[in-house]
Image (cartoon, coloured by chain):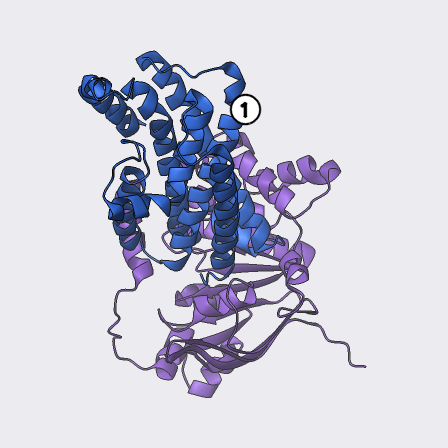
Amino acid sequence: MKKNDNTITVRNLTKKFKEINAVDDISFDVKRGEIFAFLGPNGAGKSTTIKMLTTLLEPTKGEIIINGFNSKNDKDSVRHSFGIVFQDPSLDDDLTALENMQFHAVLYNIPKKIRESRIEELMKFVELWERKNDLVKTFSGGMKRRLEIARGLLHHPKILFLDEPTLGLDPQTRKHTWDYILNINRKENMTVFFTTHYMEEAEKIAQRVAVIDHGKIVAQGTNGELQKSTNTNSLEEAFLSLTGNEIRDEEISKLDLMRQRRMIHHH
Amino acid sequence: MGQPLLFLVAFGFGFGSIYQKAGEGNYIQFLAPGIILMSVLMTAMFSGIDIIWDRQFGFLKETLVAPVSRLEIILGKTLGGATVAMFQGIIVFLLTLIVGFRPQSLASIFPAFIITFLVAVFFASLGTAIASTLDDMQGFQLIMNFLIMPFIFLSGTFFPLSNLPKAIEFIIKINPLAYGVDGLRGVLIGASSFGMVTDMLVLSVVTLAFLGIGSYLFSKIQI
């Protein structure tokens, strides 16, 4: 029996919304401990894919195996296996940082005995322990992201999913955010799966990249492999050669409208 | 909170003497139970809006990826919303006492709680059911305005159920809130039109049904 050291296996994954295949028959593997990126323009299907991987959305077709568990019939085991940092904050603004962490501990059934020590350990790791009793609504975007990372790691997942993790963050916060994540990846051999449309992020941080466009994976491999196969000298050039040079005309989505409205209310 | 009290004070004192002259007694006594439920209803329904916002920007997503069943999540959310609505109701109740409302006895507080809680759960579930099927805020505001006011005005809150045009009487009879108002009135001031048993029966069955409907629709949400 060949030992399978793939922690994520995806076969023929498809998601149809009305008439369109947002995700169209994609297949890929991610090895344990690997840092893997989904790179693609807006609307390519990155977020839809992550939502299916994290059991938020039911696939129309296809198979997802996470940490050995099938996402169709063993959802809870899959959920225990990963932590996720969403693109939009999913914290309770009216609670303190500490209370948000405690809530997560309860949701994931972390034994009471180790709850407090783990929460302290992780909050200190993202340098938010000093602010544990402050309401999350007083936190900056970067601080909220750090808190979500600490929270996502609380149940010691094998995989950390991140959907556009540094969108809207300044360069220092961006660097710090990746420092925390890469640190845990090295220490615990935790798999990291992230989506992004930032080239340098994919190039510098990911070990392997899948380029996704119009719901299909157009190429996957290491940076070197992608550049070689497109005969280019950088990931950006490879990406452009794979996805074309034209500017995409996008229709503003309902979600973007809500984001706009939210920005008005929050500032 | 302001709106229900405004109605109580404006209508209670405004129409009070006319009502008395018509032989119906003290209008404030008649009004207060419906006013209390009005505030409970509004708070409970609006706890449903949460879901539309929350499912993208808030805490709800965290609960949806956790190893917790959707049923547990929505029951928690509905009961939580109903509880907050209850607290609103209690505050409004205390304020009605200041305006002059006098319940018939202390013993009526416990059954009053039960009736109010059923109404709260019903509207929290209704809010959830509606919010689960919409994906932006604007639709929700529209529905709320076209739903909340008719619910309240055609529930027997403001006028007794005698000598009404058939159409209005019919709408009131199919409005679950009417049974809540009638029941609460029965318990607090001893005057019930439908009878306490009918009120409790209708309220319990309808609330349970909507709890089920709200939970089912929530479980079908695609983020």
* Residue at the spot of label 1: B110
Q: Position of residue A51 (x, y in %)?
A: 50, 64
**Which secondary structure, mark 1?**
helix
Amino acid type of the residue tagged 1 in the rendering: Phe
- Identify the residue shown where x is 26% and y is 45%: B168
Residue A42 as seen in the image, left or right of residue A183: left
Q: Which chain is purple?
A: A
For mark 1, name the chain: B
Answer above or below: position of A48 versus B219: below
| Viewer-proximal residue among A239 and A3 | A3
Q: Position of residue A57 (x, y in %)?
A: 50, 66
Residue A238 can be seen in this image = yes
Residue B17 lies in quadrant: top left
| Viewer-proximal residue among B33 and B125 | B33
Dividing the image into 4 quarters, which one contains the C terminus of chain A?
Answer: top left
- Identify the residue shown where x is 47% and y is 55%: A86
Q: Which chain is blue?
A: B
Answer above or below: position of B11 versus A62: above
Residue A87 as seen in the image, left or right of residue B74: left
| Viewer-proximal residue among A129 and B135 | B135
Answer above or below: position of A41 versus B10: below
